[in-house]
Amino acid sequence: MKIIDRAALTILIIGGIHLLLIGLIGFNVVETAFGDPEQWGVRIVYILIGLSALWCFKYYSFTPRGGSRLKDR
């Protein structure tokens, strides 16, 4: 599972940088690389970013010390 966790976190960080570029300078990397927003390549990238964000919700269960509240269960 560590591979999935790291991949999801990496995709989420790249997605955040993508949104930063859109907000600051209006440059959409995904549409530049994959074409029109209606094409499947762009949709797949956005779906992957969204699924990664949903996967990373589980990190809210961790305590600030790095341990899980569910560790003793």
Image (cartoon, rainbow, N blue to C red):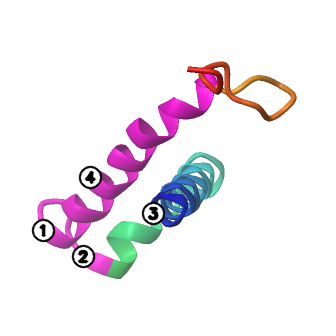
What distance separates the C-alpha of mark 2 from that of mark 3? 10 Å
SS of the residue at dot 1? Answer: loop
Choose the circle earlier in sequence order: 3 or 1: 3
SS of the residue at dot 4? Answer: helix
Disc 2: which residue: 35
User: Looking at the image, is 45 positioned above or below residue 64?
Assistant: below
User: Looking at the image, is 9 positioned above or below residue 42?
Assistant: above
Task: Give the residue drawn at x 66%, y 50%.
Answer: 24
User: Looking at the image, is 40 positioned above or below residue 49?
Assistant: below
Residue most toward the front? 72
Mark 4 belongs to which amino acid? Answer: Ile
Residue 64 x %, y %: 83, 25
Choose the circle earlier in sequence order: 2 or 3: 3
Q: Main secondary structure of the magenta part?
A: helix
Mark 2 belongs to which amino acid? Answer: Gly
Tag shown at residue 28: 3
Left or right, 43 with reference to 50? left
Left or right, 68 with reference to 27? right
Task: Give the residue drawn at x 31%, y 63%.
Answer: 45
Tag shown at residue 8: none
The residue segment tinted magenta is 34-61
Mark 1 belongs to which amino acid? Answer: Gln
Q: Is residue 27 magenta?
A: no
What distance separates the C-alpha of mark 2 from that of mark 4? 16 Å
